[in-house]
Amino acid sequence: MSQNDPEARAYRRKLLIFLGVATFFEGFDQMALAQLLPSVQRDFELSEWHIGVLVAFVNVGTVIAYLLVRQADRIGRKPLLNITILGYAITSFLSGLAPNAIVFAVLQLLSRIFLIGEWVVSTVYAAEEFPANERGFAIGLINAFSSLGAVLCAGVVPLLLHAPWGWRSVYFVGTVPLLVLAVARRGIRETSRFEAIPASERKPSALFRIFETPYKTRMLQLALIWGLTYLCTQTAITFFKSRAVDELHRSEGEVGTIISVAAVISMPLVFWVGRLFDRYGRKPVSTFVFLATAIGCVGAYTTNETWILYVSAVLAVFGCAAILPALNAFNTELFPTDLRSDAFAWSNNLLGRIGYVLSPLAVGAAAQEYGWGPSVAVTAIGPVLALGLIWRWLPETTGKELEETSKL
């Protein structure tokens, strides 16, 4: 079937909506934790150090997700997507029933494992099922749905905090659409590129297989780029509310408004950034995105001026969202089909997420001495360094089919 066939185009539209809704919860869940930290801290009587440890522990789930993600190259993209949707729905709901901080942290860790697995497989789906001239748009749109999840979460959290179950209501409400999604998945097919791999070759690969291939260096390069990026993006949004409430003495409602306004303003560009990647190239557009992230982080954590907080929040929310389709595009385009999920698992989940895990731990410790402001602002150096490495190491992939972009 031709890629321009009406039936093929209709299926891709349906697939795009399904994957977008699936990744919606990546943004919803991350924003939920960021929005609920002050309430969770009070409810479980935690210090700033304990909050940093809790966030770091939950983020370990993104590393453990490595073991789940790499299975997509063995059992297929569709079966793994089904597992992650159901697993996240169950653990997210149970998070709302957690009796103490330890149980909450464990359930959130498990949720993050399934959530990241769902996000990665959705990105691989988009890379493998869309033609070269639409691939950047598809990856960008899927990640934009993640931002939409963050917007909705930022808007409903202040309301749900006043519900009978308080902060726990967020996890109850967020589970319902996932159950609907678990039913809607039936019309989704396996990717054609994975089906093209002979069944005899779909067997468990050695854990360190990629280190025995010519793609080892490329994978390690992307791992460092991811790690440097996560130093900033993981903390810039997560601790913004804690800084604004604890240090700037802003009300939770006011902070929720800042985050919601920033998300709404940045949303159109986040949804359009995939088109920009296809039209102007991955590397030029990445320059704007990475610098916006760094500037937004510095502004959000070094000022108390209301208008600067709003502008910085817009840049930070946009940048943290738009960075994902940029790096996701590179990570899926630069490896062959039989290594695509394994390479993503290694570079993002296992190695790149070291920065994701350690950053909130280090920031939480530093915040006890220096406060949230300077402790988070210094992490803005991460995206700047990552951008330099993108220009130095990674080839431009815009407009090329995967068979060409994956060549060394």
Image: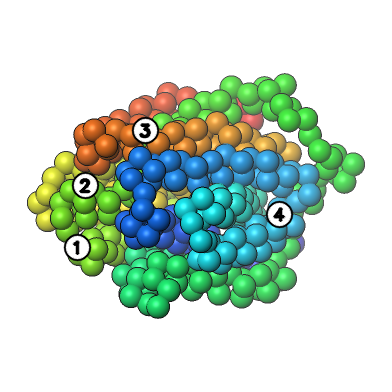
**Element at label 4:** helix
Instruction: Find disc 2 in the rendering and name its residue.
Output: 300
Q: How far apart are marks 1 and 2 (CA)?
A: 16 Å
**First in residue order: circle 2 vs circle 4:** 4
In primary-sequence order, the first of circles 1 and 2 is: 1
For the residues labelled 3 and 2, the Cα–Cα distance comes to: 19 Å
Point 59% across, 60% down: residue:
91
Which one is earlier in the sequence, the residue at label 3 or at label 2? 2
**In the displayed image of the protein, which residue is found farthest to the right?**
200
Residue at which label 1 appears: 251
Instruction: From the image, state whether disc 1 or disc 4 is nearer to you.
Output: 1
Which one is earlier in the sequence, the residue at label 1 or at label 4?
4
Kindly check if marks 1 and 4 are in contact, taking CB atoms under 8 A apart as contact: no
Q: Which residue is drawn at 50% across and 42% down?
A: 57
Instruction: Say which amino acid is labelled 2.
Output: Ala
Q: Is mark 3 on a helix, strand or loop?
A: helix
Inspect the image, locate mark 3, and give the three-letter code of the amino acid beneath it.
Ala
Which of the two discs, 4 and 3, sits closer to the camera?
A: 3
Q: Is residue 221 above or below residue 263?
A: above
Residue 217 visible, this angle: yes
Residue 41, image x, y percentages: 35, 54
Q: Which of marks 4 and 3 is nearer the N terminus?
A: 4
